[in-house]
Amino acid sequence: MSFADENRAARGNTSLESAVLLTKALRRDIQSLGVRLQDAAATEERERIGRKKGHDPDEAKRIILEMKNMMSRIEDVRTQCCCLCCA
């Protein structure tokens, strides 16, 4: 293996490690968001049937903002992984 090939492989490994870390963090955040969505849906359902009042009206806005941020992060990871193929 030539020096250039070894250097390219080392860069690829470093990029791959970074992509793995980003992907793991993203997975944890998606799971956390899923719990928040489930809680918000349960609160809405309780309110709908009249059992409980008091949900946070801004929670839906915060969840939507978090989803948009997560979509951007997913695109960043996808781009980084795609660049690994081109390295």
Image: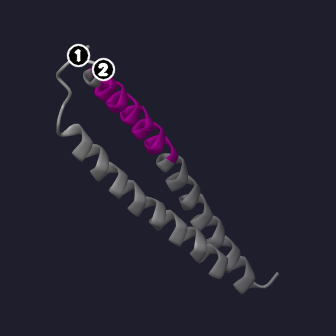
Total count of labels = 2
Residue with the mark numbered 1:
52
Asked if residue 64 lies left or right of residue 75, the reply is left
Range drawn in magenta: 27-46
Asked if residue 37 lies left or right of residue 85, the reply is left
N-terminal of the pair, mark 1 or mark 2, is: 2
Measured from the top left, where is residue 5 in percent x and y?
74, 82
Measured from the top left, where is residue 77 in percent x and y?
51, 63
Q: Which numbered circle lies on residue 46?
A: 2
Farthest residue in the top direction?
51
Position of 84 relative to 73 (above/below)? below
Measured from the top left, where is residue 49 in percent x and y?
29, 19
Q: Quadrant of residue 41?
A: top left
Q: Nearer the viewer, residue 46 or 34?
A: 46
Position of 68 relative to 8 (above/below)? above
Q: Quadrant of residue 85?
A: bottom right
Mark 1 neighbour density, 10 Å: few (under 14) some (14–19) many (20 or more): few
Secondary structure state at the residue bearing disc 2: helix
At horizontal 78% and vertical 85% (from top left) the residue drawn is: 2
Q: Amino acid at mark 1?
A: Lys
Secondary structure state at the residue bearing disc 1: loop
Whether residue 77 is visible: yes
Whether residue 87 is visible: no
Asked if residue 27 lies left or right of residue 1, the reply is left
Farthest residue in the right direction?
1
Q: Nearer the viewer, residue 72 or 2?
A: 72
Q: Which numbered circle lies on residue 38?
A: none
Q: Nearer the viewer, residue 54 or 22?
A: 54
Label 1 with label 2: CB-CB less than 8 Å: yes
